[in-house]
Structures are given as C-alpha cells and as structure tokens.
Amino acid sequence: MFDSIFGKKTSHATGNYGKKDESVFHKGVKFIAEKAGSVADVASTVGDIAGVGAGIAAATGIGAPVAAGLTAIAGGAKGLAAGARVAGSAARGTLAAETAIDKARSGDIMGAVQAGKSAGAQFAGARSGAKAIQRNKK
C-alpha cells in the first residue's frame, strides 16, 4: 500500500534508509500542505450545516437530544477545520524552510532569505492558530 502512495524504494538506495525516510516525510508534508485547505473547507461546511440543523431541531421541538447531537457535530467539525488549517500552515512552513535550506546550499542567499521569511510567516500563522484552538479549548 505504501509503495503505491510514496513510491518504491529503488535498488540504488538499498541499505540507505535515511534517504527513504526523508522522501516519505517530504511527500507526507507536501500532501498535508496541499490537502489541508480542502479538509478545512469541508469540515467548516459540515459544521455550518450541523449548526443550522441544531437550530432547526431546537426550534421545531424535534428534541433536545437531536439538537445537542447536532451541536456536538458542529463543534467537532469546526475544531477539525481549525486543526486542518494549522496543520496546513505548518506543512507549508516546513516546505518553505526546506526550500530556504536548498537555496542556501546552492549559494542563492537572497532566495534563501525570501524562503526563510515565507517559512517564518507560515509558522507564525500556525502558532497563532494553535493558540486560538488552545484558548477555545479552555
């Protein structure tokens, strides 16, 4: 299963598990960076729909348990959306940091500085999102 997702280990890398691990890690980070926004959007929509459903259930007298269940689903979906946004921002920051390192190694100092600034901005966004989730948790 993992070979189809992340690619097979080539024969020239036999015994070099560090390179394989690094490749899997990079592909996983890239996948999260690309898909986290979509997950957040879907979860946010589910939260909105469940919230409206909870309001309708409460207003029509369907029952408190139904309204409470839909409210819980709405809260969970909103939490998932927030977590996905934080994960996506952190993953994009990691990719930008890798780019900065690659540019510095190749001698492109200005490119490394720009990529480093981008990484810092992404990590700052992830940090503020994580702090907001922590505040909401309390």
Image (cartoon, rainbow, N blue to C red):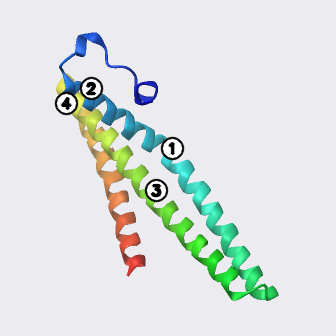
Give the image location of residue 65, x and y in percent. Answer: 66, 84
The residue under label 1 is which amino acid type? Lys
Distance Cα–Cα, label 4 vs label 3:
28 Å
Q: Are marks 2 and 3 in contact (CB under 8 Å)?
A: no
Query: Considering the numbered disc 2 on the image, is that residue within a helix, a strand or a loop?
Result: helix
The residue under label 4 is which amino acid type? Ala
* 109 versus 72 height, above or below: above
Q: Earlier in the sequence, mark 1 or mark 4?
A: 1
Q: Residue furthest front?
A: 1
* 122 versus 134 height, above or below: above
Distance Cα–Cα, label 2 vs label 4:
23 Å
Distance Cα–Cα, label 1 vs label 3:
10 Å
Q: What residue is drawn where x is 70% and y is 67%?
A: 49
* 138 versus 80 height, above or below: below
What is the quadrant of the N terminus in the image? top left
Query: Considering the numbered disc 4 on the image, is that residue within a helix, a strand or a loop?
Result: helix
Q: Which mark is residue 85?
A: 3
Q: What residue is drawn where x is 26% and y is 31%?
A: 22
Q: Which residue is mark 2?
A: 20
Q: Earlier in the sequence, mark 1 or mark 2?
A: 2
Q: Are marks 1 and 4 in contact (CB under 8 Å)?
A: no
What is the quadrant of the C terminus in the image? bottom left
The residue under label 2 is which amino acid type? Lys
Q: What residue is drawn where x is 75% and y is 81%?
A: 57
Using the rendered view, name the quadrant where residue 116 is placed: top left
Q: Choose between 11 and 79: the one closer to the eye.
A: 11
Q: Choose between 49 and 37: the one closer to the eye.
A: 49
Q: Which residue is mark 1?
A: 35
Q: Are marks 1 and 2 in contact (CB under 8 Å)?
A: no
Q: Earlier in the sequence, mark 4 or mark 3?
A: 3
Q: What residue is drawn where x is 55% and y is 73%?
A: 75
